[in-house]
Image: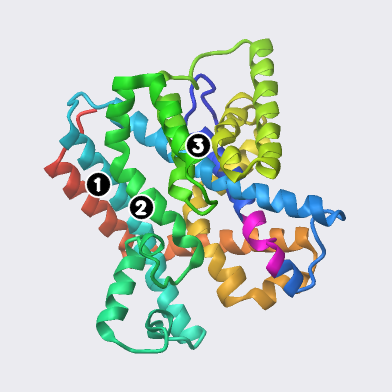
Amino acid sequence: MKTDNREFSRDHTGMTKGLLVIMMLIHHAMNVDMVEAYGVRRMIADPVLSNQIVLFCKTCIAGFAFLSAYGMTLTLKKQKDDNLENYLFLSLRRLIKLFSGVVFIYVLAVLWEGFAMGRPFWEIYGEGGRDPLRILVCMLLDLSGLAGLCNTPTINITWWYLSFIVPVILLMPVFYILYKKFRYFLIPAFLLPSFLLPGDRINFIYLLPVTILGVAFAFEGWLTGEERRAVRLLKTCGCLLLFAAAYSMTMRVGIMCGYTLMFTLPCIVYYCVGYIPILRDILGFLGKHATNIFLTHTFLYYYFYPDLIYSFRDSWKILAVLLAFSLCVSMAIELIKKITGYQWLCGKILEAFDKKWPSNG
């Protein structure tokens, strides 16, 4: 992988996603309930420290939020036609790309659940009943990523993140316009609600600060430019210290503080990891499959094959097996998309969309 180190490129994004995927698997697969239920040996002998690491890895969702906001802002910034309608069409295009993957995996999961696991979909959504209208509404909400917001049954508990990212993608034009107008003043404005509103489950509010930081980094160009080695080393050390602070604050102050400081992980990738040949290639490969792994890994370790995954008993072996299993499933999904023509169909839909509302970037 040849990386242009003068700016935070798609390669850097892929490497960062690779790191975030590993954190996600640690947080989900090594949670206390699963570890205790299957008698798994912990990652580290000290149970308190091991649990703290697992909890901290929850901040991976803030890293994904930062990258989404960063990428969307760059797209909006390139547009010559500076109006809200054009921005909204770009947000809609981003949603089409997202849900092209969600829909395919959703259909596969429903079929696998029914035929391979013997659990028909109406048992997931019916909650003991078989009201067709209720089942249909719940399926549509789940498929649209809004089940988490509407508190309705879902085929996959970790898909709650879609309930955050879908509204954010739709609101990105508003965030971008607000940032252009108020610039740095917008950052503390979005920090305040997360401090003032109580509760640890208001994920939408808690993730907004790092989302706005993603907008700011892209708009201001804070991850661009050639750096002398000494300057790059100082910035890397600074980001590592902030990352350590994120861990400490997550343990002592609250998960929201860790969320806010997760902008440091892309910075570490930009200033350090991008210069390490083998590591950057491995993480970049993981990053290419990040969306598929996010959408499927919970099916593998929690819904379909927990006895197989946790039969290895050791945390590190389980993580390696789950990562390899998830990668194989992702590659199989991409192959099926290609063979069935689904990939071609999605390309045609985006092509038709671009013809109707051509980008002017």
Q: Secondary structure at mark 3?
A: helix
Which residue appears at 56% of the width and 39% of the height? Answer: 16
Residue 275 visible in the picture: yes
Q: Secondary structure at mark 2?
A: helix
Look at the numbered discs 3 and 2 and tell me whether their residues touch, using CB distance below 8 Å: no
For disc 1, the marked residue is 92
Frontmost residue, 92 versus 275: 92
Which residue appears at 32% of the width and 61% of the height? Answer: 144
Quadrant of the rendering where the C terminus is positioned: top left
Q: Position of residue 68 (x, y in %)?
A: 42, 40
**Looking at the image, is mark 1 or mark 3 earlier in the sequence?**
3
Q: Amino acid at mark 1?
A: Leu
Label 3 Cα neighbours within 10 Å, binned few <14 / some 14-19 / many ≥20 = many
Q: CA distance from mark 1 to mark 2?
A: 10 Å
Residue 283 is drawn in which quadrant? top right
Q: Amino acid at mark 2?
A: Leu
Main SS of the magenta segment? helix
Q: Which mark is residue 13?
A: 3
Which residue appears at 54% of the width and 70% of the height? Answer: 299
**Looking at the image, is mark 3 or mark 2 earlier in the sequence?**
3
Frontmost residue, 315 versus 348: 315
Q: Amino acid at mark 3?
A: Thr
Label 2 Cα neighbours within 10 Å, binned few <14 / some 14-19 / many ≥20 = some
Label 1 Cα neighbours within 10 Å, binned few <14 / some 14-19 / many ≥20 = some
Q: Give the side of residue 40 with respect to residue 9, left or right.
A: right
What span is in magenta?
A: 25-33
Quadrant of the rendering where the N terminus is positioned: top right
For disc 2, the marked residue is 98
Frontmost residue, 183 versus 307: 183
